Image (cartoon, rainbow, N blue to C red):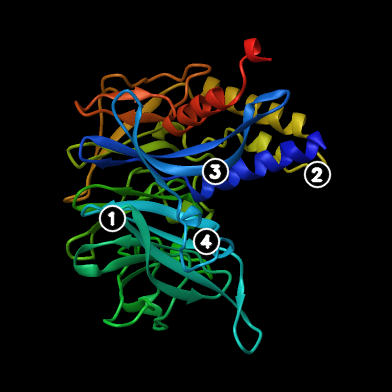
Amino acid sequence: MKQKVILKSLFVLGLMAVLHAQPSQWVDKLLMVRHSTGSTVPDYPGLMEVTGSAQVLIDEENSPQKGIPNLEDAPNFPISKRYLSMNMGYYWYDGILYTTASGSNERNEDGSQFLRWTIAKWEDEEWHCLGYMNTDIATMLMAIPCAEGRFIIFSNKNLKFENPSDRTPFYRASIPSGKNEFRLDSPIAHGMNEFPSFFSGQSLTNYFHCQIVMTDEYSTIIDGKTGLFWVFSLEKASLVKAGTIFKSITPEIVANNGYSVSPIFCIQPEKEGTVLMNTENEKVLTDGIGDYYDKLLATPNLSVEEILKLHTLRDEDIARQRPFIAWYRLYPENGRVEKLSMAPEGGIEIKEKGISFSFRPMLDGSVKMGNISSQLAQDSVKKREPKATDK
C-alpha cells in the first residue's frame, strides 16, 4: 500500500512539474505563483502527495496576499470538473487572469473521441467561460491572452493550415461575436527555418519542455531542452523575434531532442520587463554527463528507493563535474540575449549541495534563491499537520 502511495506521489509530482511548471508573473508589485497543497508521504518527507492548488499573489516576504482558486474548483461553472482536470497554465493580462483547461476525452455522435479545451477568465472574483476549442485527443495547447480579445494558441501539432510552409505551433485566435467556439484566424510563422526537424514531425515542438514567461507587453516561450525561444507582442498578437539562448545549438542537437541534460534551471520575469534565467555553463552542454544514469533509470522493475537513489547520485555527479552556473538576461522588445558576467545580487554561481537552483525575482532587481512553490507547499504542510505537543 505504501509503495502505491509513493508511486502515486511521484506520478502526481511529475505531472505537476510538467503541466504546471510555469514561471511566476508580476501583478503590480506582487508576484503570482502556483501554490500546491497536500501532505507528506510517511517515511519520505521529501515527497508530497498533492491534493490541491491555487494561484496566489505574494509579497517580497513570500507572504500570500490574495488567492485565486483553480478553474476546476470553481462553483457553478458550466463544465464538469472531470473535463477541466488538466490545466495548461494561468496568465494575467490587462487586469484579468486567463487559463486553458481540458480533461477526460469526450465523444462525437459517430463515436470518435475528442478533447474540448475550455478557455476561461477570472474577473469580478469569479470564473467565466469564454469559449471552447475541440481537438483530437493527441493535441495539447495553451491560449495566451492578447489585446482586443485575441489569443495566441501554442500547440504541439499543426492544427488547421495544411500548406507545408504553414506548419507551425503558433496561431492567432479569437471568438466571433455571438459565438462560444474559438476560431483560428491565421498561422504565425515560427521563424526557425534553420532548425527544420523541430517542426517536421507529427509533434511540432518539445511542447512539455517549453515555459511561457509573461511580462507587461510580451510573452516569451522558451524550450528548456534546446534554448530555442520565441517572443510575441501581446498588443499585436504577432512574433517579434525567434532566437537561441546558446550558441552551441545545432540542427543535429535539435533533431536529437535537445541537449543530453536540460540546460536551463529556472526562468523568471523581472519587474522591468526583461526575462532572467540561470543555466548550465554552455561549455559542458555536449559532454554527455548523466547518460550513464539515464540508462540505469531505464532499467525495468526498479524500486522507488532505487529510483530516488539514482536521481540523487546523478544530480550529485553532474554537480561535481559541472560546478558552474551561468546567468542570462533576455530583452523581449528586440530578442537580444545577454550573458551576465556575474550572478545578480542574491544569486549563486557555483552549485552547492542542498541549494535549489530555482530563484524568485525581487522588485529591486536582485533574486532570492529557492523554489517559491515548494516553500509555500512546505509551509502549508506544516500548518496542516499536527504538532507533537498536540498528540
> How much space separates mark 4 and mark 2, taking CA atoms?
33 Å
The answer to whether mark 4 and mark 2 are in CB contact below 8 A is: no
- Of labels 3 and 1, earlier in sequence is 3
Quadrant where the C terminus is found in the figure: top right
Observer-nearest residue: 347 or 13?
13
Q: Which residue is mark 3?
A: 52
**At which x and y percent is residue 165?**
36, 78
Dot in front, 2 or 3: 3
Dot in front, 1 or 2: 1
- Of labels 4 and 2, earlier in sequence is 4
Q: Which mark is residue 300?
A: 2
- Of labels 4 and 3, earlier in sequence is 3
Q: Which residue is mark 4?
A: 84
The amino acid type found where label 3 is placed reads Gly
Q: Which residue is mark 1?
A: 124
Total count of labels: 4
Quadrant where the N terminus is found in the figure: top right
Name which residue lies at 64% across and 26% down. Answer: 312
Name which residue lies at 64% across and 89% down. Answer: 110
The amino acid type found where label 2 is placed reads Pro
Dot in front, 4 or 1: 1
Instruction: Identify the element where label 1 is drawn.
Output: loop
